[in-house]
Amino acid sequence: MSLPVILQLPSSYKMTDEQFFEFCQVNRDYRIERNKFGEISIMSPTGGKTGNRGGNIFGQLWVWAQNDGTGLTFDSSTGFILSTGAERSPDASWMKLERWDNFNDEQQEKFLPICPDFVVELRSASDNLKPLQEKMEEYMQEDGIKLGWLIDRKNRKVYIYRPGMSVECLDNPDTISGESILPGFVLNMSLVW
């Protein structure tokens, strides 16, 4: 099982958001996140199956967003700075245009200091479920988040997260609805399993 490498920095060294952004830019071959304690997680690129399935999720979301026109999609390379100071990169996400438009050009080029309205995390065969569940709970504590999906391909389950509500678990669904947050968006799970 391939686990992310966790780097701990000395307590005397606090990397600013700008320094962390630069660190990620010079290490582009890795997916890098930072938790609220300042620990840096370095994850290797995904394998072919996970990359393909993640692409299928993003592709379906992107097509819906282009037709809907009320927001923007972001892929797994996009970093978001949460209110806790954590920098996270969901596998796919979507944000309303009016929230995006609050940022100037320079801000839009960096990690965004905001949580998207909708996030998706995809569990690969080598991922432990618990850290992904903890990450989803972290998103649900943020202002602006409306809906989140944790897709567990290994067990064919989808965990649906909504702020202030209990997590709903779907067992081997054919589709998942974007509900009122993403009206008309339906993810075809046959392209994900």
Image (cartoon, rainbow, N blue to C red):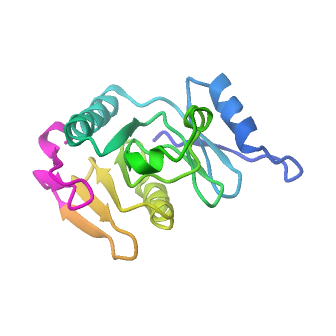
- Which quadrant of the figure has residue 26? top right
Q: Is residue 1 left or right of residue 38?
A: left
Instruction: Count up the numbered dots.
Output: 0
- Which quadrant of the figure has residue 20? top right
Q: Is residue 22 left or right of residue 159?
A: right
Query: Residue 113's spot in the image, x, y percent?
Result: 59, 49
Residue at 21% x, 52% y is 156
Q: Residue furthest right?
A: 12
Q: Is residue 133 left or right of residue 192?
A: right
Residue at 12% x, 41% y is 190
Q: Is residue 72 magenta?
A: no
Query: Residue 83's spot in the image, x, y percent?
Result: 61, 60
44 shown above or below 156: above
Pick the residue in front: 71 or 35: 71
Query: Residue 118's spot in the image, x, y percent?
Result: 36, 53
Magenta segment boundaries in residue numbering: 171-193
Residue at 57% x, 31% y is 109
Q: Is residue 182 magenta?
A: yes
125 shown above or below 22: below
Query: Residue 116's spot in the image, x, y percent?
Result: 44, 51
Pick the residue in front: 16 or 43: 16
- Which quadrant of the figure has residue 126? top left
